[in-house]
Image (cartoon, rainbow, N blue to C red):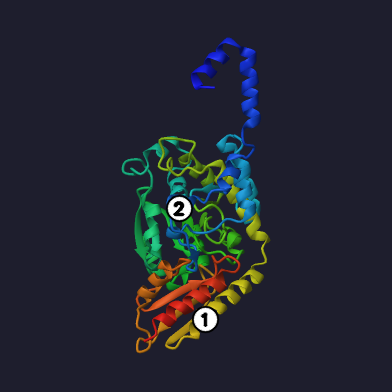
Amino acid sequence: MKRRDLIKYISISPLAGGAIASGLANAAPKSTPIEVAKKRDLFSELGVRTFINAAGTYTAMTATLMRPATVEAIRQASHKFCMLDDLHDKVGERLAEITRAEAVVVTSGAFAALTLGMAGILTGMDPVKVKQLPKLEGTGMKTEVICQKSHAIGYNQALTNTGVKIVMVETLDELIKAINPNTAAMHFLHVQSDKGQIQHEEWVAIGKKYGIPTTIDIAADVPPVSNLWRFNEMGFDFVAISGGKALRGPQSAGLLMGKKDLIKAARLSMPPRGETIGRGMKVNKEEILGMMVAVEEFVKIDHDAEALVFLERIKKIQAAAESVPGITTKISTPVLGNVTPTLNISFDYSKIGKTGEQLRLDLRDGSPSIESVGGKDNIGMTAWSLQEGEDVIVAKRLKEVLEAAVK
């Protein structure tokens, strides 16, 4: 039946139309949209390169892969509506229990957590000040954040996005002299704490003595799992962490943990509220529930056993590399952040005819494509993001690439 005839038929016969509609419904595919999507290789369809990730949880490499329980939480969340603030409240309560913080809110990553946490410090519960950010002049809000020079990294822009300026110090004496009526906070970077003269506990103690909020960035600093609550219990006013790294939550999610009043104030700059500095830092219901389940799963894991699995995988890759003349390797595990066994491969250029950069391109351009890190003279790899069996593939392919480069 042609379309025009079908329309004419339905218009003159409601009962027939109902029967046809029923028939069409019965004939419709039973698969849900999600099930249909599973049958499609969307990356291939779009021509997007995928790869084995032997590098780590880098943002540019789409960070991490979520666990099945997290994906299922996202799937369930996608089928129902709720009020965004209600969900933030309940998930925050659950996460506060796990992280031993007074309060928690899911944010759109650690960077957003830093911005929103600083916004909460600056504005408190004043809705007028919330709308004024990042314009601080003439508002009565404080304007300076103190940071150790060794902790000065590009991600501190998350703080300056609120309008504050960073005041750098090195010694304890300089810190105390830098404190003044315009000091809004004292910011700390855990992953480079070994490079500074003032350590966590002393930083917090000085902040408490002078009534200055202390904040800390621990974006990629779990494991150990204890870091989820260590800095909350230490007394930092807020703690920012990424959800898309070892926690294996959604890449675009993170946590802002801290004092209840501060988190409450930070949420004034978050969606669903508009006209705020954080309006674009929206987290949807799927990410909120996915992040909650990711944390629940993370604290259940036997991290010592997982670390041994990672070590065995990276040793397999190391053995393959060392079987090639002119190759030197070393495995080390960072202490403060990205805590996973890391393989460094270096070369004797009297025997190897390619640089580290060229060899990494060979790995990238091969089949399967493999991503690694490093500089001109080395290749760096971790097993953190490898799936079961991929260590064997990486070892085999790495050996092929290195052997091809032997003079």
Q: Position of residue 351 (x, y in %)?
A: 38, 88
Q: CA distance from mark 2 to mark 1?
A: 42 Å
Residue receiving disc 1: 320
Residue 375 vs 100, above or below: the answer is below
Q: Write down the quadrant of residue 228 in the picture.
A: bottom right
Q: Position of residue 23 (x, y in %)?
A: 64, 25
Mark 1 belongs to which amino acid? Answer: Ala
Question: In the figure, is residue 22 to the left or right of 85?
Answer: right
Residue at coordinates 59% horizontally, 62% vertically from top-left? Answer: 230
Mark 2 belongs to which amino acid? Answer: Leu
First along the sequence among labels 2 and 1: 2
Tag shown at residue 8: none
Tag shown at residue 114: 2
- In the current view of this chain or complex, which residue is farthest to the front? 1
Residue 131 vs 41, above or below: the answer is above
Q: Which one is in front, 272 or 363?
A: 363
Residue at coordinates 35% horizontally, 86% vertically from top-left? Answer: 349
Dot in front, 2 or 1? 1
Identify the image quadrant of the N terminus: top right
Residue at coordinates 35% horizontally, 80% vertically from top-left? Answer: 354
- In the current view of this chain or complex, which residue is farthest to the left? 137
Disc 2 vs disc 1: Cβ atoms closer than 8 Å?
A: no
Q: Position of residue 331 (x, y in %)?
A: 51, 80
Residue 151 vs 350, above or below: the answer is above
